[in-house]
Image: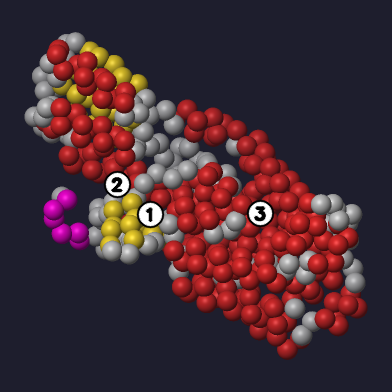
Amino acid sequence: MYIVASFYYSTSLEKCLNEIEDYGIKREYILALPLDKKRKNGRITDTINHSDEISTLDLSAFLGSILMFFGGVYGFILPWGPIIWGLIGLATGGITGLLITYLTKKRNFKRISKQKTSEVFVMIYGTQEDTKKIIEILWDNDALGVSKVEL
Amino acid sequence: MRDLEDHSRRKLVAMDSKTINTLALRSPWATAWFSFLFPGFGHFLVDGTILSAILITMEFFVNTVSKLNLLIFYTLIGEFEKAKAVTDIHWVFIYITLFVFCIWDSYRRCVENNRQYLLAVKEYSRIEVMKITPTGMHKLDKRNPTVAAFWSFLYPGLGAVYLQKLPSVIFGFSWMFLVAHFSNLLDGIFYTLIGDFSKAKEVLKPQWFLYLPSIYAFKIYSSYVDALQINKIFDMEQYRFLKENYQSCKFPMPLK
């Protein structure tokens, strides 16, 4: 009997594997398959997530900071004062930046949201009697999906 | 592999019980932009260390004594005579050197760091998951970048507490104390909230108030990208752990 589950990279995944071992499944009977993340092809989102120089937040930070500064300056002569105009500047700049990034890189954004489904697969070999308990442990520790196969 | 000595030449992350510093891929243009906003911030983004704190202190000092923010303020609202009168020429020239150097140097450092990063990820350097000492505890764990950015927006420095980056916490808090005190920020917020805008304009000091946009933008941005990087390192560490410990050749594969 095989049980397959998928997870995000997380501490609860390690806790889960630990609990399954405690329950009595040998480590040799647990197979974890951490998935490589797609690189290169997805020229996008956060600089740091992917090896490129384009980030979702770069333009927002640029526009947000400059407009907040102008809001602060001209707020001293405009009716509502520098604090309100500064915040308006920050919000306008930040949102405009995000919108422009989103519109110009729409395709990539979609690809990223698709990618984020699962990150690790775990396959466990156990007897029929163990199955129920193992599935319970998996669900208790934030498994994204669980499946049972008889081969 | 775990028990063997770590022979890697380049490290991705250094962590102790109080702080964490990570090598990361950053955009050189964003780095240069933050140096433009506030000399020293670019260095903070790339290296995150004491060096940038010295530059930032320098900038605070020179900007304040030369009244540079006031110069920019009066120039932008069109009162050129006042702008000329208020500035201390004596100090402005030092500022210019510092300013140009910081932009150039942070850009250069960022490009260098990106190269080192691409080499470092290929090496199997040991990543520690936890450090605990009598004075503090630090765990490598997933952080939510949006939450980090949000707390930084409410009070610059809190995002760094969430991420447990000690230098950012210390400097974030001290800048904010200084700036909020000397600009009369809180009085300004109070008068703005009760609707007395002319009083708000009167109490707020442009010289100090105009530090705030760069501090806010920088703190929000840096806590967001730092959180992403910490998550990425966490993933990397767990990936290696699973490959080493949960891929036994004895696993009974369905088809043999």
- Using the rendered image, report if marks 2 and 1 lie on a common chain: yes
For residue A41, which numbered disc appears in the image?
none
Mark 3 and mark 1 residues within 8 Å of each other at the beta carbon: no
Q: Which residues are magenta?
A: B2-7
Q: Which image quadrant is residue A137 in?
A: top left
Upstream in the sequence, badge 2 or badge 1?
Answer: 1
Q: Is residue A143 above or below residue B131?
A: above
Q: Is residue B74 left or right of residue B212?
A: right
Q: Is residue A105 above or below residue B47?
A: above
- State the residue at coordinates (54%, 30%): A110
Q: In the displayed orientation, state which residue is furthest to the bottom.
A: B90
Q: Which residue is mark 1?
A: B118
**What type is the residue that disc 2 sits on?**
Glu
Magenta segment, principal secondary structure?
loop
Residue on which the image places disc 2: B237
Q: Which image quadrant for residue A102?
A: top right
Q: Mark 2, chain letter? A: B
Relative image position of residue B68 (x, y in whole percent): 74, 76
Query: Is the same chain shared between marks 3 and 1?
Result: no
